Image: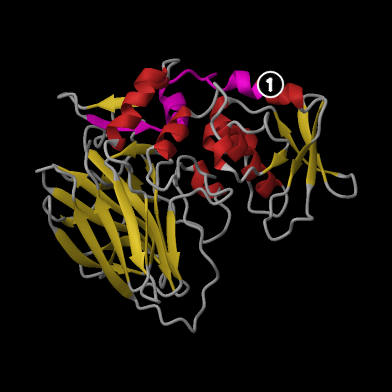
Amino acid sequence: MHLLSPRKLTASLAVAAAVGVGAVVVGPADHASAVADTIPLTLKNTSGSGEQVYVYVIGTELASGKQGYADEDGVFHAWPAGGAPPVPAPDASFAGPADGASKTVRLPKFSGRVYFSYGQKLDFRLAEGGLVQPAVQNASDPNHDVLFNWTEYTLNDSGLWLNSTQVDMFSAPYSVGLTAGDGSTKETGKLKPGGYQAVVNGLKAQGGGWEGLVETRGDGTPLRVLAPGHGISSGAIPAGVMDDYIDRVWAKYAGETLTVTPFKDQPDKKFQGRVNGGKLDFTDGTGAVVTSFEKPDSDSVFGCYNKLDAPNDQVRGPISRTLCAAFNRSTLLSNPEQPDADASGFYQDGVTNHYARLVHEQMQDGQAYAFAFDDVGNHESLVHDGDPKDATISLEPLD
């Protein structure tokens, strides 16, 4: 298990990537905004499961900076002090809707998560440093055999950012949506019919160790598919599964130049990359080396961290984000001008992030957060509005 850290309200996803949390990108607060303190959240259950659903709204209350949870009326409750070893957290759950039904609750101004579980409640603990959340890559975690998932959101004076995330795992499917201030609706994260099982079957058929990411319950029910970074840390997938592609990239750019244009609104701000002495050096317009990357391993690629660390700056972080996305999508050999906005060229190499490939293939709109920087080029599953009227989370069929 690991601590749930407050989400940084920033355009950088680096912190989220480091702890395996899909990210919500938020803008500066507009204190003249009329965004209410809470907005309606409608939970819709079309899962086909007869099991009781339990719902949790947890995170950081933005007004106070305190961590805690909200009840179904949107009322904030701060966590009590934790302990060492971690102690049980108060029961923050409330009953979700039955299959075929809906339930409307209040969503408060948080930076946090909405968890939901089927059949049994989640086991949350409080350490001295804060809330301990489920770590699905740990087979001994008390929540390992529970079917559950979560969505991530920020609601503040500038609006609502709500995403579906697969950065840690692909599990109990759901979609997210909202009604905008102009009355229009937005939705994302909805799978194609049979999409849940199609991802599971696709990884099993892929071979090469990718099948090890699939985790099932004792009765054979798929519990989740681990994201490959967690698969490496748990030994579920070979640690060198991306090495062949990484080696080919390093060889290519020892003799060619890789151009990265990380800011869409600054098309003239370009960085040139060449491999020198085993490191990928990037120079700016003056020819000065501004940052260098050691040759990454598969874990660094999948996690968008370690040797592909992305600090919240204006140079290394944006370049690293672009590199990470291109490695996961396997576009660095086919396109030396990054980022590549055309999704038709993604995941075409035999060595690629097949987890991300399959998740995107099975989304009706093609959008997903299958790795931390999946928002490079706007391929993420995110809905946003500056004046949201309401939000929805729909629990989708488990097939």
Residue, far right? 286
Closer to the camera in the image, 40 or 292 = 40
Under mark 1, the amino acid is: Arg
Q: Position of residue 118 (x, y in %)?
A: 17, 43
Tell me, what colour scheme is on the image? secondary structure
Image point (57%, 25%), residue name = 349
Q: Position of residue 150 (x, y in %)?
A: 32, 48
Image point (53%, 49%), residue name = 375
Please identify the quadrant where the C terminus is shown: top left
Closer to the camera in the image, 27 or 350 = 350
Residue, far front? 344
In the rendered structure, the answer to whether residue 122 lies left or right of residue 363 reads left
Q: Is residue 190 above or below residue 224?
A: below
* Kind of element beneath mark 1: helix
In the rendered structure, the answer to whether residue 162 lies left or right of residue 282 reads left
The answer to whether one can see residue 196 in this image is: yes
Closer to the camera in the image, 167 or 94 = 167
Please identify the quadrant where the N terminus is shown: top left
Q: Is residue 15 above or below residue 112?
A: above
Q: Is residue 154 magenta?
A: no
Q: Is residue 227 magenta?
A: yes
**Span colored in magenta:** 222-246
Question: Quadrant of the rendered structure where residue 350 is?
Answer: top right
Neighbor class of circle 1 (other Cα within 10 Å; few <14, some 14-19, many 20+) is: few
Question: Quadrant of the rendered structure where residue 345 is?
Answer: top right
Image point (35%, 20%), residue name = 204
Q: Position of residue 124 (x, y in %)?
A: 26, 46
The residue under label 1 is 248
Image point (24%, 46%), residue name = 396
Q: Is residue 167 above or below residue 210?
A: below
